[in-house]
Amino acid sequence: MEWNAFNSGRICNISLASDCSSDETGSATEMNAPAKTEDFALSIPAGVYAETVLDVTHYTDRLFRFTMTRPQGFRFRSGEFAMIGLMVEGKPVFRAYSIASPAWAEELEFFSIKVPDGPLTSHLQAIKPGDQVLMRKKPTGTLVLDALTPGRRLYMFSTGTGIAPFASLIRDPETYEKFEEVILTHTTRDVAELKYGFDLVHEIQNDELLKEVVGDKLRHYPTVTREDFEYRGRITDLISSGKLFTDLGVPPLDPVIDRGMICGSSAMLKDTKELLEKAGLDEGANSKPAEFVIERAFVG
Ligand code: A2P
């Protein structure tokens, strides 16, 4: 299996510049630790799942990943997001999180930023296996295969935690049924922040079932902007200069062949969208599939 040069080493939750407070609670500033388990059961809001944390991995002082149990009967499409929350001072605080695990997985995975005084993530970053996390029942989102018209090559453009929905999609066999080539770009400030993506690609390469399905279709293009690395620069600059395409050995963006998904900060979404539109690709949605899609749920 050929994983090409960009897979040497490592791969939208959207990159969150700021934490989002609950639409129910408004913004909260002073917070205690999450409620203890025995109090928690009494206070779970109606219509919300309370799931058990299974595993937590801290990558840097800004990034962590966790997995939790998947409620029976909870269905989602790879690439969608859900509202994840905790009880804080007796009130539920929720934020939109891309589900990073694929639709077929038994557990739910999330990749999160840590905002020191964020209403949710200041608490969420302290979760441990056995703790409970809330999840609203209805997942949704536009970074889904159904929102794209048929094409040959699928680009997934991500920055920071914006890689999360693509972590789901690159582990879904349907992605490889629909596209001949899948290019995952992941840009972070420094090399340490790329690790989640590298681990993910490594996991796929070593998974007996997935490696059969994925073959050599997945290409990983990691870049960093604030320290030395083999591939450097913002993805927008690499598209504009054409270096992305030269490095990958593919032709420039073509609306007949190429499809795109974008997940990152609001500025990154805007700038990347402009470049795709300049190349002749139109933005799509669940109700009107087209050549590229953006997830706006995560940005203020
Ligand atoms: P930069 O270091 O030049 O700001 P963050 O961690 O702040 O979400 O950023 C993740 C990555 O997204 C960083 O490498 C950052 O580059 C990059 N980035 C920030 N704004 C944009 C933008 N408007 N277009 C493309 N990339 C961006």
Image: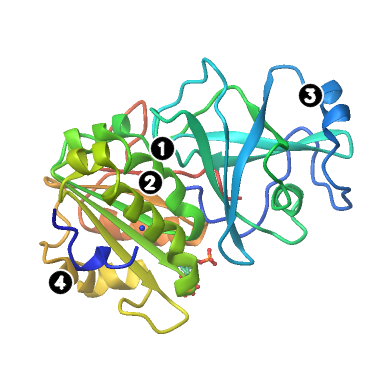
Quote the CA–CA distance across marks 3 and 1: 27 Å
SS state under label 4: helix
Labels 4, 2: front one:
2
First-in-chain label (2 vs 3)? 3
Check disc 2 and report the residue beneath it.
166
Q: Position of residue 284 (x, y in %)?
A: 32, 37
Name which residue type carries label 3: Ile
First-in-chain label (4 vs 1)? 1
Name which residue type carries label 1: Gly
SS state under label 2: helix
Residue at 36% in and 80% down: 229
Residue 246's label in the rendered image is: 4
Check disc 3 and report the residue beneath it.
44
Q: Is residue 152 above or below residue 246?
A: above
Q: Position of residue 227 (x, y in %)?
A: 45, 82
Q: Say if mark 2 contacts mark 1, CB within 8 Å.
A: yes
Quote the CA–CA distance across marks 4 and 1: 28 Å
Q: Nearer the viewer, residue 38 or 84?
A: 38
